[in-house]
Amino acid sequence: MLKYTVAIAGILLVTGCAVSFPQAKGGEINSASSSLFKSDAEKKILTVLEEMVKSQRTYFSVPAPDGKALRLLTEVADAKNVIEIGTSTGYSGLWFCLALHRTGGHLTTLEIDHRRANVAREHFRQAGVEKLVTVVEGDAHEELAKLKMPIDVAFIDADKGGYIDYLNKLLPLVRPGGVILAHNVEMVPDYVKAVTTNPGVETIFYMEGAGLSVTLKKR
């Protein structure tokens, strides 16, 4: 797995390109494609994702192309510890779970809004992944300071004014070779500058969805 991870990361970083994923009409998830290769657990997660989109219970969540990127990058990294800042209603968290049920990893997701945190917990329960996820309620700026685990993949999708603080708190926690992902990066030019001028990281941008930066912490 490691040599495949290095190979794929190397291709992306050298070319500066990002993978494009085919989209279903209207941005829906087309779970019918390649259904023979999907496990029952994966089908259950995809069903909840589709229902969330159809019932408009995603609330400022990532679009499906970005969700697919989260899943792909997490699985390629063989991630065991994933941190998400900004749970919302659990949509992006479920994309992570598509990878984590294969890697044997765990998602810790931080949400400041009690109502959204409870909605997310219910979606995780419906998808059968509640044991893969810990939802932490509170201010992520404060909660991050309590974490000590080595992080394989981190995802920032919360208050845009806080991106730099999140980055500064995450960098010491992310293992060498780990990845920091950030959403809607066109809205946070100071973050873009930070991850493209820091010699300790390498960053590419995936713009198929709503703007996702992929930052590798160098070894």
Image: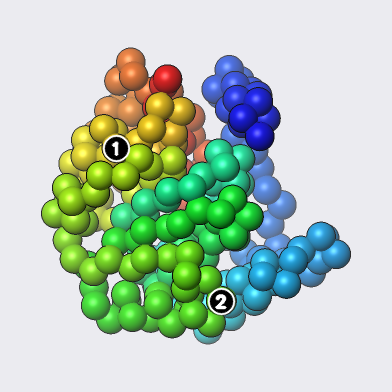
- Image quadrant containing the N terminus: top right
Please give the name of the residue rendered at 29% of the width and 61% of the height, measured from the top-left corner. 110
Amino acid carrying label 2: it is: Gly
Q: Quadrant of residue 179?
A: top left
Whole-number angstrom distance, CA of label 1 to CA of label 2: 29 Å
Q: Quadrant of residue 202?
A: top left
Tag 2 residue: 128
- State the image coordinates of residue 100 (x, y, percent, origin top left): 55, 56
Task: Please identify the residue farthest to the right as the structure is shown.
Answer: 36
Left or right, 10 with reference to 110: right
Q: Do the residues bearing badges 1 and 2 touch, measured as CB atoms within 8 Å?
A: no
The disc at residue 120 is: none
Q: Is residue 176 above or below residue 117?
A: above
Q: Is residue 85 above or below residue 151?
A: below
Amino acid carrying label 1: it is: Leu
Tag 1 residue: 173
Residue in the foreground of this view, choosing between 27 and 89: 89
- Image quadrant containing the C terminus: top left
Q: Is residue 80 visible?
A: yes
Q: Is residue 20 above or below residue 127?
A: above
Q: Is residue 191 visible?
A: no
Residue in the foreground of this view, choosing between 188 and 130: 130
Residue in the foreground of this view, choosing between 34 and 3: 3
